[in-house]
Image (spheres, rainbow, N blue to C red):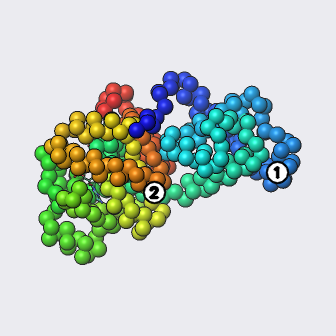
Amino acid sequence: MPRMTPPPVDRAAAAKAAVAARRARATVKRDVAERRRTALEVAEAGWASEPTAPEATLRVRELLTSIPGIGPTRVARIMEQLGIADSKRVGGLGVRQRVILGDWLSQREARGRVKSRLVVLAGPTAVGKGTVSTFIRENYPDVHLSVSATTRKPRPGEVDGVHYYFVDDDEFDRMIRDRELLEYATVHNQSRYGTPRPPIDAALDKGRSVLLEIDLQGARQVRAVMPEAVLVFLLPPTWEELVRRLIGRGTEDTAEQQRRLETAKVELAAQDEFDVKVVNTEVSEAAREVVDLMTLPAAPSRPSGSRLQ
Ligand SMILES: Nc1nc2c(ncn2[C@@H]2O[C@H](COP(=O)(O)OP(=O)(O)O)[C@@H](O)[C@H]2O)c(=O)[nH]1
Ligand SMILES: Nc1ncnc2c1ncn2[C@@H]1O[C@H](COP(=O)(O)OP(=O)(O)O)[C@@H](O)[C@H]1O
């Protein structure tokens, strides 16, 4: 599998790029408003700013990457859909491309304004769903992290009501019967897992954002019953890194690891069903990208190196 993330950039350059990206987004939107005066007039008017202005020299790829929740893989797909070459700079776009890009940005913004506060986090085994969710629970207390019910036995250190509600088969059946579960599924052909609905409704009613960390089958069910939910697919930086994480975790024997990796291939093939892809290279970064989707103010950052760095 090819690398999915670009090499790290230095912070000053990243900050400069972020400012340029913000200005470029504003310029493209202004440009779209102007286009109503007819495409010809816009063509004659040319680009709204100097060709050397930072927003004009910025690559479209960088502009799109600067939008929270859009990773490099998604950017490549969006650019292909919009028919914009990878090397294009914002200032070098033709009228038609500017119109297409401007429309896309406006639609994205409109969607952002009505964005659901319910985010579903899914992804292949060992990609780091649990780790990212735990980071969010510990660093973004405004987010309500759903606690699932499961028929699997607790692992050492797992606390009932915190990590899961550990229930037996009869109780799980009762929850299904009484329609207490938003979704449920049998995972890894072993145990049943389900999302209790009442706490989610209560949290949403109070205006809190809600995060569900569930499997692919569950994510599809949530989409069917709550189409406003934002579905996030967590990706590993590379396939090799996913294998390393699974083996490194050391919670499955070799046969089970093989079985999970086979499932992971199937799950990775479903990534395009999701609204947003987030690459889990750095736990804190991936967590921030997920929380950004909920339009919450960011939590104060902890001193670097305090956890999971
Ligand atoms: N559909 C569904 N899947 C869940 C739910 N809770 C957890 N899962 C998924 O169940 C799988 C197994 O979770 P777990 O037993 O904690 O083991 P691990 O994540 O593989 O270490 C993971 O893919 C979770 O995302 C739920 O409420 N519904
Ligand atoms: N960004 C990351 N960088 C390095 N290791 C990670 C990262 N995210 C998670 N891990 C490690 O990968 C392993 C699997 O993570 P886990 O959260 O259990 O995955 P999942 O819940 O998706 O099955 C764990 O050992 C965890 O510490």
Q: Nearer the viewer, residue 34 or 306?
A: 34
Q: In which quadrant is the C terminus drawn?
A: top left
Beta carbon at label 2 within 8 Å of ligand 1: no
In the picture shown, does residue 53 fall above or below 232? Answer: above
Locate residue 148: give its quadrant.
bottom left
Q: In which quadrant is the N terminus drawn?
A: top left
The secondary element bearing badge 1 is classed as helix
Q: Residue at x 22, y 37 (%)?
A: 247
Q: Nearer the viewer, residue 140 or 176?
A: 176
Q: Position of residue 245 (x, y in %)?
A: 27, 37
Q: Let me know if residue 66 appears in the view.
A: yes
| Amino acid identity at mark 2 | Glu
Q: Residue at x 61, y 50 (%)?
A: 81
In the picture shown, does residue 103 fall above or below 186? Answer: above
Q: Position of residue 108 (x, y in %)?
A: 59, 52
Q: Which mark is residue 81?
A: none
Q: Which mark is residue 39?
A: 1
Q: Nearer the viewer, residue 255 or 60?
A: 255
Residue on which the image places disc 2: 273
Locate residue 47 relative to residue 151 in the image: left or right: right
